[in-house]
Image (cartoon, grey):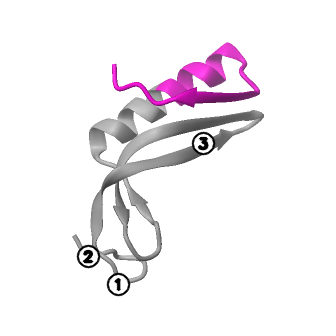
Amino acid sequence: MKCVICKQGNTHTGTTTMTLERGHTTLVFKDVPAQVCENCGEAYLDDATTQHLLAAAEAAVQAGVQVEIRAYSAA
């Protein structure tokens, strides 16, 4: 697909690092599957991946995590 940010590059299957913050919690997920723009590097996640990250983030907030770095795991 054409990148909606830079409008120049096309996206290709790849991985990205996502940082999520809420309150006093900061989570970094590495190797998240995404469609990544070849020009500007903007990453697009599918709905299932997004829901998985949000659920993991909510669990971390509830557990009182302040800072954590995780490798992405789909299961």
Dot 2 or dot 3, earlier in sequence: 2
The image quadrant of residue 22 is top right
The amino acid pointed to by label 2 is Lys
Is residue 7 placed above or below 11 in the rendered structure? below
Instruction: Give yes or no for contact between labels 1 and 2 (Cβ–Cβ under 8 Å).
Output: yes
Dot 3 or dot 1, earlier in sequence: 1
For label 3, the residue is 20
**Magenta stretch in the rendered image:** 56-75
Is residue 20 placed above or below 73 in the rendered structure? below
Q: Is residue 35 left or right of residue 57?
A: left
The amino acid pointed to by label 1 is Lys
Which label sits on residue 2? 2
> In terms of secondary structure, where does tag 3 sit?
strand
Q: Nearer the viewer, mark 3 or mark 1?
A: 1
Dot 1 or dot 2, earlier in sequence: 2
Give the alpha-carbon distance from disc 3 to disc 1, as whole Å. Answer: 25 Å
Q: Is residue 25 left or right of residue 72?
A: right
**Neighbour class for label 2 at 10 Å: few (<14), some, many (≥20)?**
few
Residue 40 drawn at (x, y percent): 47, 74
**Residue sitting at 29 percent across and 66 percent down?**
11
**Residue sitting at 54 percent across and 46 percent down?**
18
Q: Nearer the viewer, mark 2 or mark 3?
A: 2
For label 1, the residue is 7
